[in-house]
Amino acid sequence: MTDYPDLQLYIGGAWKRTSASQPVVNPASEAVIGQVPVATRLDMDDALDAAQGGFKVWMRFSPRKRAEILLRAAALMRERVDEIARAITLEHGKPFPQARLEVIRGCEFFEWDAAEGQRIYGRVIPSEPGIKYIVHHQPIGMVAAFSPWNFPLSQPARKIAGALAAGCSIIMKASEETPAGAMHIARALHDAGLPPGVMNLIFGVPSEISEYLIPQPPVRLVAFTGSTSVGKRLTRLAADYMKPVLMELGGHAPVIVCDDVDPAAAAAASAARKARNAGQVCTSPTRFFVQDGIYAAFVDAFVDRARSVIVGDGFESATEMGPLANDRRITAMEALISDAAQRGARVLTGGRRLDRPGYFFPVTVLADVPDPARVMREEPFGPLAVINPVSSIDEAIQKANGLPFGLAAYAFTHSAARADQLAEGIEAGNVSINTLEASVAETPFGGMKESGYGREGGTEGLLNYTVVKNISHSMTIQR
Ligand code: NAD
């Protein structure tokens, strides 16, 4: 397969090779497929200079002109969807059709943000005659952004599209494990005519880059998606320099299944969703709390669907779920499953790595998992579901809210009263009822509690990349 791109840094509108690099591995074969460049301190300084210059130019572009470039870039990515999706499947392992959908989703972020960037309205506050109070949202400035490996294109797309649509420049440090998606975004923006320095792409040693960039005075916002522990570290560093943060962190999504729904339909939808991206999604449905009247039927149907998921190479047409993205996920899954089993949980399907090259792990279902089991508190970030019975909706809400996470949550019910109780009572930034979709381009996505701070997507998402300025303008000189 020769579809994997020649990876380079993108700084000040130019592609750049480095003397140091590290290998990119195909998780389906464990073969090295490319080399990702490692940025030096000099490269980071170049990116800072470029992004400062880029911001001065871009902030003066009219929102309409910005939108034209962002829409052109999205159109180019749509034209290149197969090429980009092949690179994503190679570096991440997800099935090719899912990689294609990811590219389309990334384009939707660009398209929606491009349009919404033209509607970042301010206010004129009613005042005494002779004075005007005008509130407006200015672009916040240069953004330092960090994206993870689970969605190589759509994760960096969220941040780049939001920042650029709001008039900011950005230094994007994308994942070294899955760098091709971000590279394709840079290529599309370059080809669409983005001025040099507005978007810069670097890779390297994550901690070295964040520790160097965040304190730099021109950096005005830190945007990160990844684990809660790293998010806290970067937030502490940003606080030392009084920089705002946008943090999309871990989740451990609860799913409350009420006894007024068809358990087989809810279970089949849930098991299929669990397999999406091999469960490596911060919104992946994980902790199932099922009312006891339909518990047995729900568990049986879930296990049936989980067993039917075809696991394999992402380029094989029958494949529903690819490998895990790296061997750290295998280790984490095995540790959580063995801990739960030792504490009395039933392992109903899956449970161990497949005996073949690549990081393949089947959809795994644990039932009747005791509360002290680690998996009840720690996000598995893999194809692992835990299913426990509950005797009431109140008990389900209490369990759903029992963790420090609050990102996505789901419920199945056809009762308007229960839906309202669940939507109001669950502590999560996103509650979805009778659907397992947690976010689309036009809705705000983000966490409560330790799942993060700020929102991406929707009108709220763009506002994160702005700062409010109030202008008091008297028509005469006031004494
Ligand atoms: P990790 O905590 O080492 O890294 C998570 C992400 O943060 C990676 O993209 C990594 O490159 C980056 N990172 C790590 N240290 C950094 C630093 N000092 N500065 C800047 N970036 C840094 O864990 P991992 O093994 O890569 O991923 C596993 C965990 O991460 C999962 O359990 C999951 O909770 C979380 N995760 C969350 C998301 C999400 O969408 N919210 C995505 C990927 C990973």
Image (cartoon, grey):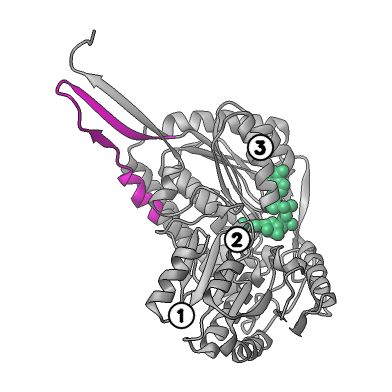
Chain part drawn in magenta: 112-139
- Please indicate whether residue 228 sits to the left or right of residue 13 in the image: right
What kind of element bears circle 1? loop
Closer to the camera: disc 3 or disc 2?
3
Vertical relation: 12 (above or below) 96:
above
Badge 1: how crowded within 10 Å, few (<14), some, or many (20+)? some
Vertical order, 306 against 41 (above or below): below
Q: Which residue is mark 1?
A: 413
Which numbered mark, 2 or 1, is in the foreground of this view? 1
Task: Compute the Cα span from label 1 to label 3.
Answer: 40 Å
The residue carrying mark 3 has its beta carbon less than 8 Å from ligand 1: no
Going from the N terminus, do you reach mark 2 or mark 1 first? Answer: 2
The outermost residue toward the left is: 129
Question: Looking at the rendered structure, which numbered label has been put on residue 236?
Answer: 3
Q: Is residue 293 visible?
A: yes
Report the amino acid beneath label 1.
Answer: Thr
Label whose residue precedes the other's in the sequence (3 or 2): 2
Vertical side of 281 occupied by 51: above or below: above
**Residue 94 seen in this snapshot:** no
Position of residue 95 measured from the top left corner of the image (x, y, whole percent): 62, 74
Residue at image x 36%, y 46%?
117
Q: Residues within 10 Å of mark 3 (few under 14, many from 20)?
A: some
Three-letter code for the amino acid on which mark 2 is drawn: Phe
Circle 3: element type:
helix
- Whether the residue carrying mark 2 lies under 8 Å from ligand 1 is answered with yes
Q: Nearer the viewer, residue 413 or 271?
A: 413
Q: Nearer the viewer, residue 400 or 89?
A: 400
Residue at the spot of label 2:
151
